[in-house]
Image: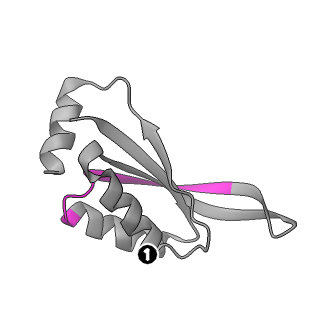
């Protein structure tokens, strides 16, 4: 099984915590890391400076499509970030846990 990480940012901890719990409970992801960050970005002609929460969704290739669809359908932003990171190297014991947690 091929591991992947999907990243997205959320406006507050409540919005990411709810979806993260649901995804872990339904074995779509093995883990979601949630990190408070500061973001500077251009939005509708203005430079924005805001606090956000970065979510790292850890899963396997076969769950990628359903994960991306779930993020898109539940995300509070009009234009959510849904970026995929392909993993080229991972330790075997972590990969084993990841696969067991998402099947």
In this rendering, the answer to whether 97 lies above or below 88 is below
Residue 32 lies, in percent from the top left, at 36, 54
- Res. 16 image quadrant: bottom left
The residue drawn where x is 70% and y is 56% is: 39
Does dot 1 land on a helix, a strand or a loop? helix
Which of the pair 75/24 is nearer the observer? 75
Residue 8 lies, in percent from the top left, at 51, 57
Q: Is residue 33 magenta?
A: yes
Answer few, some or many: residues within 10 Å of disc 1's Cα (few below 14, many 20 plus, some between 14 and 19).
few
The residue drawn where x is 59% and y is 73% is: 77
Q: Where is the N terminus found, in terms of image quarters? A: top left
In this rendering, the answer to whether 11 lies above or below 102 is below
The residue drawn where x is 43% and y is 74% is: 73
Which of the pair 89/39 is nearer the observer? 89
Give the magenta-colored segment's residue range. 25-38
Residue 40 lies, in percent from the top left, at 76, 56
- Res. 69 image quadrant: bottom left
The residue drawn where x is 26% and y is 24% is: 91
The residue at which mark 1 appears reads as: 74
């Amino acid at each position: 099984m091929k591991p992947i990480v999907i990243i997205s940012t959320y406006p507050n901890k409540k919005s990411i915590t709810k979806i993260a719990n649901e995804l872990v409970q339904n074995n779509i992801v093995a883990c979601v890391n949630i990190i408070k960050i500061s973001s500077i970005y251009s939005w509708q002609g203005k430079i924005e400076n805001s606090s956000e929460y970065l979510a790292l969704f850890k899963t396997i290739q076969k769950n990628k499509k359903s994960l991306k669809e779930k993020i898109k359908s539940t995300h509070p932003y009009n234009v959510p970030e849904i970026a995929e990171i392909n993993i080229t190297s991972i330790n075997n014991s972590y990969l084993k846990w990841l696969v067991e947690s998402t099947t």
